[in-house]
Amino acid sequence: MVAPIINRSSDWFPESDLYISKQIQQIPKSEINKVPEYLQNIPQGSVLIYPLILDDRLEIILFSPNTLPISRSVKISQNKLEELIKEYREGLLDAGSEDVKQSSKALYDLLIKPIENELIAAKANTILYAPDGILRYVPLAAIYDGKQWLAEKYRISNLIAYTLTDFSAKPKTQPNILAGAFGGKKGERKFGQDGLPATLKEVQAIAKSFPNSVTLTEDGFSRQAIESKFKNHNILHLATHAEFNTGSPDNSFIIFGNGDKIKLNEISEWQIPNIDLIILSACQTGIGKLGNGVEILGFGYQVQKAGAKNAIASLWSVNDEGTQALMEAFYSELKKGDVTSTEALHRAQVALIKSSKYNHPNYWSAFFAIGNGL
């Protein structure tokens, strides 16, 4: 499936000054009480949270509409933070573990509790999250306040590059989906990858719910077939493997059902101004040693640079049934109309939290939104 990228490569982000993190870090102390121009259009009810990792502490910076930025310091060493995140992810990746709530609550106390009152005062319902370093492996939706998961309280979307983010409201359009499924048989290899038979059911369910959708499966799911149909659709759903490899994005790719590949750094060359959302539903990132999360940023950056407004990807591999359940709930919400992708994901996650079979965060928190969710 997918291996993590550990080393940062400038090829992922040719315009390095695009990072929110870098911009915020460069704000002089004398300017911290001024709202950066690019954040002045955050809609009411939305806030931007940026946790900055320093040697001996976290700086939690909060931006909200019509107020001055707020900064809170939380004492914790980088080593302690890394230990906590590793413990937390162990609990997330084990769907039978109940221990995840303890480390999840500890992360809540670090990231959200210091600004809890400000979130209430801002009447926040949407969090735009710009995590730093290893925190990119933490799905904010699955941190726990002692009573609720954050996903039950807020819509959450990861914000990547501020200059690629337009906060103006968009007219809602009916989903017109182009979906591809890798397919194959369970337990068998296909083009060097494990077969993904559940992806066929996944796109069949999309076709059933959205009669105007186009689905491509197995050999018919080629790079050329997908690229020839971009202009007629506003959602691109790729139910297939992605490999995010250490180092250059030249070695990182998404594979199609006929064995074709697209390198991640080629995605930005796609001309897809009509695509509102790209979903990569069978990928996983952050296996093994945790790096700085650059592979997560890399995918989001390339997608947004190509012209898509938002993306949904996963931080680890969810089992076939869990992925199918979440995607069915997601598209069920999207079908209701006038619903953003971030809102639909939020509702789908809450639905799984309330279910008896898929209420562990392993199933519902792997998938995260990238973009401003509008």
Image (spheres, rainbow, N blue to C red):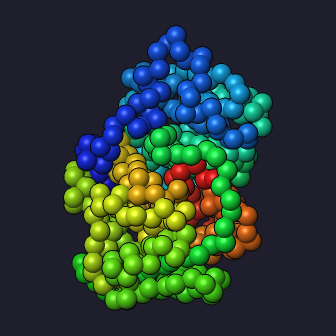
Q: Position of residue 157 (x, y in %)?
A: 57, 49
Looking at the image, residue 75 sits to the left or right of residue 246; the answer is right
Work out whether residue 331 can be spotted.
yes
Rendered image quadrant of residue 36: top right
Looking at the image, residue 57 sits to the left or right of residue 15; the answer is right
Q: Position of residue 141 (x, y in %)?
A: 60, 50
Looking at the image, residue 230 sits to the left or right of residue 276; the answer is left
Q: Nearer the viewer, residue 300 or 102?
A: 300
Question: Residue lying furthest top in this view?
Answer: 30
Q: Residue at x 29, y 68 (%)?
A: 262
Work out whether residue 87 can be spotted.
no
Q: Is residue 33 above or below residue 325?
A: above
Q: Nearer the viewer, residue 180 or 304?
A: 304
Q: Residue at x 57, y 82 (%)?
A: 213
Q: Is residue 364 above or below residue 60?
A: below
Q: Residue at x 33, y 40 (%)?
A: 15
Q: Position of residue 252 (x, y in %)?
A: 27, 61
Q: Residue at x 61, y 84 (%)?
A: 212
Q: Is residue 175 above or below residue 315?
A: below
